[in-house]
Image (cartoon, rainbow, N blue to C red):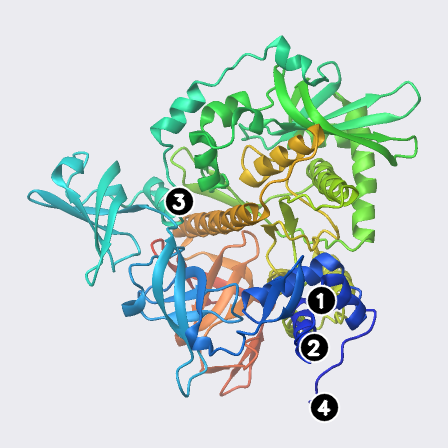
Amino acid sequence: MSKNRKKPIKGKKLAPGQLQSEILRLLKRHPKKRMNARQIIRKLKIANNSDVVAAAADRLVKKGLLANVEENKYQMNSQASLPVDNRTYSGIVDMTKKGSAYIVCEDLDEDVHVAAKYMNNALNGDKVLIRSWLPKGRRRREGEVLEVLERATTQFIGIIYIYGTKAIVVPEGSADIEIVIPHDRTKDAQNGEMVVVEITEWIGGNNNVNLGKVLAVLGKQGSSDIDMKAILVNNGFNLEFPEEVIYESESLETEITEDEVATRRDMREVITFTIDPETAKDFDDALSLEYLDNGNFEIGIHIADVAHYVQHDTALDKEAFRRSTSVYLVDRVLPMLPEKLSNELCSLRPLEDKLTFSAVFTFDKNNKIIDRWFGRTVIHSDKRFTYEEAQEVLENGAGEFAAELKKLNQVAGRLRKARFKNGAINFETEEVKFRLDEEGVPVQVYIKERKDAHLLVEDFMLLANKEVAIYIFNKGKTENQEIPFVYRIHDEPDPDRVAELVRFAAELGFEMHARTPGETANAYNKLAEAAEKDPGLKLLQPLAIRTMAKAVYSTKNIGHYGLGFSYYTHFTSPIRRYSDVLSHRVLAKNLEGSWRINQEKLEEECQHISRMERRAMDAERESVKYKQVEYLQKHIGDVFDGFVSGFSDRGIFIQLETNFCEGRVSFETMDEAFELSDSRLYVTGKRTDQKIKMGDKVKVKITDTDLYRRQVTMVFV
């Protein structure tokens, strides 16, 4: 045994990587032994719960190192000794601009590089089957695509070129493929126009030529509108709903019948209102407050009953699953559901009866929860508040429903305090917002303020999400058989990344103690507090977020580290998240009796939803970057204050203080040559030893913008 290897700490929680190592080490010592999660916990004397241990063991099963045998018992895999080169893996394509790609595989600790000639017609975002190997004398794994398992998209955006009886479209950003369009399928597009095309037949081959048809003609390239549509299409989101989906949505019954009301809890007489952004059109949650005769009170969290209208396996349902989420760009929303549902039937508009799925909590006089109820309801919203209107009432203590808002805010504050006491991380990352003119061009960039009205709504949504997950888990425990469910999980941060952040923070003069997951959460909260006083430290917060795992959907519950919850789901936004529709269906069935969905199928759906969520986030970030560059086009020559936010081999990245736009100062424009440190946290002047480090405050002038590449060029003043 290596003298340098750290022994597991008895009675402590192990981080994900260390947990996998210790499970593997344990079963290697007993290759014929079969152990379940509880037995592993006892043998290792650790404090991780059985769900977390099972998830770590399942990961080792996927890597081919363990085998899952009888009733979730684990054993060393007899095939584990096979050479890695003989195994195949599935993963997601992350394409480079040169046509090669990195395949992100769950079952491998590193991404696999695939040269362009081995891509086998796979495109960015596709799920593929690969073979992987480690070339002699190299550290990086190489591979080849054997098969495309699932296409990320069949629609693309690009310029059409007309050639006699046919046309060719080269998708934007995908110069390595061509789509041939027969003349009768061009929708009369003119040569050089931007079009949306759908591939109807994947041919591939050496020239990677495919057949397709034009779905929409967008016009000449160069407008902001076309660029925004391109962002959506390039991230795998279709701009239009299929005809059968629109037909189904338009055929839905709009009237709420007395027979339907009779099957629900009628809460139309209870004071109820919505609080949403000023520009919102889909109101998918409402809050109610009712005082009971015994002095207790009930707070209702009412969610649009989307699952009532979107029935399983219909065209509507299949399209909602395929999209999985609404996408919110700076200047538009691409909805998950057609407008008839998202803005009408399921939108909890004021002074209208609406069908909802509710979580109702009974509080005693001390604001403590003493009972909870879940079920289908019918409500009647009394008022639609914007966040600004609700905040004004809270601040002034006067206005419509002032007493109700004050009470809700008081209870929300108590819930928030308890959450942070139990280990939640207080990361309120600044959200960049834009004011646009009539043409959609940004005239102002600012940071969204989060006040009590925002936090109030968030706290009650978190409560409902948490309690629904607890209810399902406990019901399964009572029945001695797990109920497969859509959990929202968030793993503990990677210890190596945390250690790197701690070293980085120390160089900026901020000391962090983060040896355990609990200490790490506390350190991140202290960082958030310090950043309020020292804006330079705000640059550490995005880095701290990067040390943490991404929250995903899974049937394998390991808890939500960032929120400090052992059980958590998404229940409160079914208009814009398909995960919530699934949660509603499972909850509804289990309120009526005992019902279990196939866990393997549900897990596959969770993985798809997680992938689509990441694509939506990428699209949203791209649109923000686009609008930031578009805004700075009008400020070439202007001088701004900023902070050093990063380094590359070619220059220094600067984040502007007032609007959070980012650009780069090239080393070529500076007075002397600079050397980048190994840590990439600072540069040093070769002649003067001048040091420029992360977080330094600087003045810069905007010298150029490139909207196509989303780049801003700056020089130091």
First in sequence: mark 2 vs mark 3: 2
Q: Amino acid at mark 2?
A: His
Query: How many angstroms separate mark 3 from mark 4 (CA)?
Result: 53 Å
Q: Quadrant of the N terminus?
A: bottom right
Q: Residues within 10 Å of mark 3 (few under 14, many from 20)?
A: many
Alpha-carbon span between mark 1 and mark 2? 10 Å
Tell me how far mark 3 sits from mark 1, CA to CA. Answer: 47 Å
Question: What residue did someone put label 1 on?
Answer: 35
Sooner in the amino-acid sequence: mark 1 or mark 4: 4
Placement of 238 over or under 40, stated as above or below = above
Crowd around label 4: few <14 · some 14–19 · many ≥20 (10 Å) = few
Could you tell me the amino acid type at mark 4? Lys
> Residue, x 67% and y 71% (percent of image)?
495
Circles 3, 4 touching at the beta carbon (< 8 Å): no
Q: CA distance from mark 4 to mark 2?
A: 22 Å
Query: Residue 17: image x %, image y %?
Result: 65, 70
In the image, residue 569 above or below residue 520: above
Q: Are marks 1 and 2 in contact (CB under 8 Å)?
A: yes
Q: Earlier in the sequence, mark 3 or mark 1?
A: 1
Q: Residue furthest top?
A: 258
Q: Which residue is mark 3?
A: 232
Residue located beneath label 2 in the image = 30
Does residue 381 appear anywhere in the picture? no
What element does badge 1 sit on?
Answer: loop
- Residue type at mark 3: give it: Leu
The crowd level at tag 1 (other Cα within 10 Å; few <14, some 14-19, many 20+) is: many
| Total numbered badges shown on the rendered structure | 4
Residue topped by disc 4: 3
